[in-house]
Amino acid sequence: MLDGKRILLIIGGGIAAYKSLELARLIRRRNGEVRAILTKAGQEFVTPLSVGGLTHDKVYTDLFDLTAEADMGHIQLSRDADLLVVSPATADLMAKIAQGRADDMASTALLATDKPVLIAPAMNVRMWEHPATQRNLAQLIADGVSVVGPREGSMACGEFGPGRLAEPEDILAAIEQQLGGSGVLAGRRAIVTAGPTHEPIDPVRYIANRSSGKQGYAIAQALAQLGAETHLVSGPTSLADPRGVRVTRVETAREMLAATQACLPADVAVCAAAVADWRADTSTNSKLKKDGTGAVPPLALIENPDILATLSSAGPDRPRLVIGFAAETDDVVAHATAKRQRKGCDWIVANDVSPGTGIMGGDSNTVHLISASGTENWAPMPKAQVATQLAARVADALGAMS
Ligand SMILES: Cc1cc2nc3c(=O)[nH]c(=O)nc-3n(C[C@H](O)[C@H](O)[C@H](O)COP(=O)(O)O)c2cc1C
């Protein structure tokens, strides 16, 4: 039940706008309060009269409407809400929110808020898959916006694929999850590692790798959105802390292991970091210098501790579910299957990071989920969606274990 929770429903200009009328009705049936903003394009699809008839309230359409501004200023409108829901979130609205634009009532309310925001995207499959929309989606997720849908299916335009608005019941469930604070992972503790490690050679040089941390950050965000108390241990990245996640930033593999162990006990550990296998044997506090003779300093390597194997080893602190990542360039599934057995973890998420795949540092991923019961090949999708899907699987698995 929503018991008096206040939803600010922002209806964009998409063909699925009519479904937001049903959403408004469902929110009220669950004892929630709903107030609506209808964009200019939204009014081409549904009328303020029908929206107001279902919200039992004035419908806000115009930023410069004097009566509306005197009655309930645009700032107050977003402050008074417990949650802002954008449905349908058109490609245009997603771009506006991602860029922080504020040129109408909807975008201004979205920029002026410090309340959680949930978007339900709906658009033609090509608009959804366009790199610009996927960039905006990644930005919105990084900014802490929650996303429900889109679903795959046939569309009003006659095409088939992802882009259909989530069903009003699914959006309602996402709203209740967001507001109840009792997501399916409430009461669970999660650890996620992400990013590369930097292994110093001297005070200015280090050994690193190309991991951006995007996939691990998205997973931490998705687990937190399902209610898990989530701790992210991150190597050096340029990414902002995911909202609602405790973050510890480290540099080396040894620091990452210590920070990870300090987060135990946990129900689930997701080791998405690209931890350096080796570090320089003798790192020095003085910068190495050329001596003019052409002599090259030797660079001996020694093995780093294995964080995934350490977390996977049996003991009272072993998380119930340990998930590793395997970034491979050839025989991806075979190598990852062997890695799962070698390390003793429960699942391995494997991906092909060969040059040309664009996965290292990119916004999309194509993964295989390998467990004792076999291999699932997931379709290519944005990293945010891999994260949401994996978090849902974690919730299922932990639910089945308890
Ligand atoms: C018939 C029709 C249907 C449309 N459906 C969608 C849609 O489902 N999703 C979308 O992103 N844009 C859709 N558009 C384009 C948007 O209406 C347009 O980008 C508009 O500027 C979005 O305004 P907004 O930011 O207020 O949502 C549609 C346009 C037309 C003419």
Image (spheres, rainbow, N blue to C red):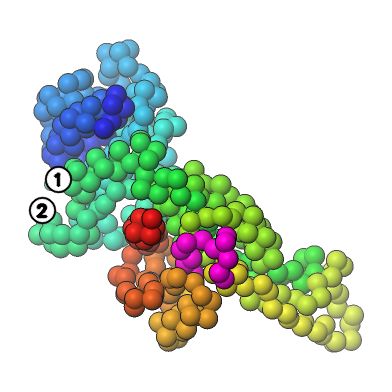
Tags 1 and 2 in contact by the CB under 8 Å rule? yes
- Residue 156 badge: 2
Task: Specify the amino acid type for callout 1.
Answer: Ile
**Does residue 143 sit above or below 341 in this rendering?**
above
Vertical side of 3 occupied by 308: above or below? below
Q: Is 206 situated left or right of 126 in this image?
A: right
Identify the residue position indicated by label 1 in the image. Answer: 15
Q: Position of residue 83 (x, y in %)?
A: 35, 33
- Frontmost residue, 197 versus 220: 220
Q: Is mark 2 within 8 Å of ligand 1?
A: yes
| Residue 295 picture location, percent across and down | 85, 87
Question: Picture quarter containing residue 144?
Answer: top left
Q: What is the distance, in whole Å, between disc 1 and disc 2 at their CAs?
A: 8 Å
- Give the image location of residue 76, x and y in percent: 38, 21
Specify the principal SS of the magenta part.
loop
Residue 299 on image: x %, y %: 77, 82
Q: Quadrant of the N terminus?
A: top left
Picture disc at residue 266 = none
Instruction: Name the residue: 71% across, 75% down.
Output: 279
The quarter of the rendered structure image containing the C terminus is: bottom left
Marked residue nearer the N-terminal end (1 or 2): 1
State which region is magenta: 313-324
Q: Is mark 1 within 8 Å of ligand 1?
A: yes
Relative to 325, is 72 on the left or the right? left
